[in-house]
């Protein structure tokens, strides 16, 4: 009982910090979901766009720019990276995964060029989390409020966009690009714009994370993709993905649940190096579960045919 009480006490103590972090990283999960679900474009650019946004924001903060300008510049840089990935795929007929790997690899050198070194401290620089009047700057409450409001705004804007004619065109390209092109939809514009938008969200998450933790690092995106996939799988299992609003809500719900599960594992005493292994096994299980269900369901049919 003492062990359970200690675990719960530790979990409750770190819950606000984890909630703030999950709301920031939910934008990466959103950046993974849009190409993966909306465009049928499996993409790895997010793992490079996340540190790209952080490096751009960190350099601007160190130069004395406003935190809002840092986030805006990260959005533009991430959008450009995503557009390049989609262009490589469309122009040179390179598989989406390989195009994402190429862009992610090139972004590592670009991030080093942007900062001039592997990491950069921006402790003491202003951040968007300082704008909450009733919360102490730098504390989880201010980060939860700001990140929560940004998440709500992103959800509402994306929901309204995907219900418009252009948003429907993007979804049509993901469903059937040949049919969409036959209907007069510009497949190139929809694909490049959609992947660019997704990478812009990932980069904005990196910018917010740098302002939250006070430093930028070229390796800050290491493993973010597998964490984002795990969060997306959890969100889709809980919320579903049958409608547009469910697809958009799944990244935010999944990020919150996933990082709370991570906090609980840490509070229970799991060594931090084992978290990557546990995350990978969880994603593997979530991906393999539908196949296992189909195999189990088709077993009686095979027996009947054999008889």
Image: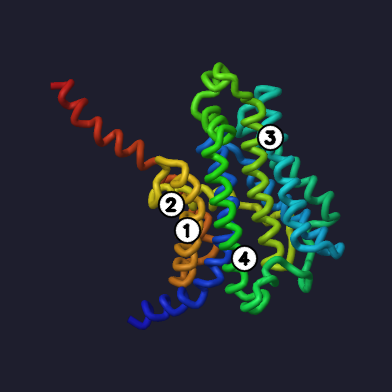
Rounded to the nearest angstrom, the CA distance separating label 3 from label 4 is 30 Å
Characterize the local packing of mark 2: few (<14), some (14-19) or many (20 or more) Cα atoms within 10 angstroms.
many
Instruction: Find residue 135 and report its image quarter.
Output: bottom right
Q: Are marks 1 and 3 in contact (CB under 8 Å)?
A: no
Residue at disc 1, secondary structure = helix
Residue on which the image places disc 1? 258
Residue on which the image places disc 3? 85
Rounded to the nearest angstrom, the CA distance separating label 3 from label 2 is 27 Å
Residue on which the image places disc 4? 146
Q: Are marks 1 and 2 in contact (CB under 8 Å)?
A: yes
Rounded to the nearest angstrom, the CA distance separating label 1 from label 3 is 28 Å
Q: Identify the residue at the far top of this view.
A: 182
Residue at disc 3, secondary structure = helix
Q: Quadrant of the C terminus?
A: top left
Residue 123 visible in the picture: yes
Residue at disc 4, secondary structure = helix
> What x and y, as percent, mark residue 276?
53, 55
Rounded to the nearest angstrom, the CA distance separating label 1 from label 4 is 20 Å
> What x and y, as percent, mark residue 21?
58, 64
> What x and y, as percent, mark residue 13?
50, 77
Establish if 303 lies above or below 290.
Answer: above
Report the side of 4 relative to 74 (left or right).
Answer: left
């Amino acid at each position: 009982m003492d062990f359970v009480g200690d675990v719960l006490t530790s979990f409750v103590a770190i819950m606000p910090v984890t909630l703030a972090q999950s709301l920031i990283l939910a934008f990466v999960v959103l950046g993974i979901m849009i190409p993966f679900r909306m465009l049928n474009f499996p993409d790895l650019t997010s793992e490079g766009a996340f540190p790209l946004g952080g490096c751009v924001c960190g350099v601007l903060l160190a130069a004395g720019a406003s935190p809002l300008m840092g986030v805006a510049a990260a959005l533009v840089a991430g959008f450009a990276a995503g557009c390049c990935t989609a262009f490589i795929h469309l122009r040179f007929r390179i598989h989406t995964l390989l195009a994402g790997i190429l862009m992610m690899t090139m972004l590592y050198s670009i991030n080093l060029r942007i900062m001039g070194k592997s990491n950069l401290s921006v402790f003491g620089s202003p951040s968007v989390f300082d704008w909450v009047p009733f919360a102490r700057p730098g504390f989880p409450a201010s980060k939860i409020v700001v990140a929560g409001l940004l998440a709500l705004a992103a959800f509402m804007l994306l929901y309204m966009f995907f219900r418009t004619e252009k948003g429907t065109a993007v979804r049509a390209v993901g469903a059937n690009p040949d049919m969409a092109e036959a209907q007069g939809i510009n497949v190139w514009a929809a694909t490049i714009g959609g992947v660019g938008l997704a990478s812009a969200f990932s980069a904005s998450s990196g910018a917010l994370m740098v302002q939250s933790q006070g430093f930028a690092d070229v390796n800050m995106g290491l493993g973010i993709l597998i964490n984002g996939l795990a969060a997306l799988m959890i969100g889709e299992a809980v919320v579903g993905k049958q409608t547009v609003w469910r697809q958009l809500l799944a990244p935010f719900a999944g990020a919150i649940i996933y990082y709370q599960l991570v906090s609980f594992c840490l509070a229970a005493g799991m060594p931090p190096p084992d978290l990557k292994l546990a995350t990978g096994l969880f994603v593997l299980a979530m991906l393999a579960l539908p196949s296992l269900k189909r195999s189990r369901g088709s077993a009686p049919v095979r027996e009947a045919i054999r008889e």
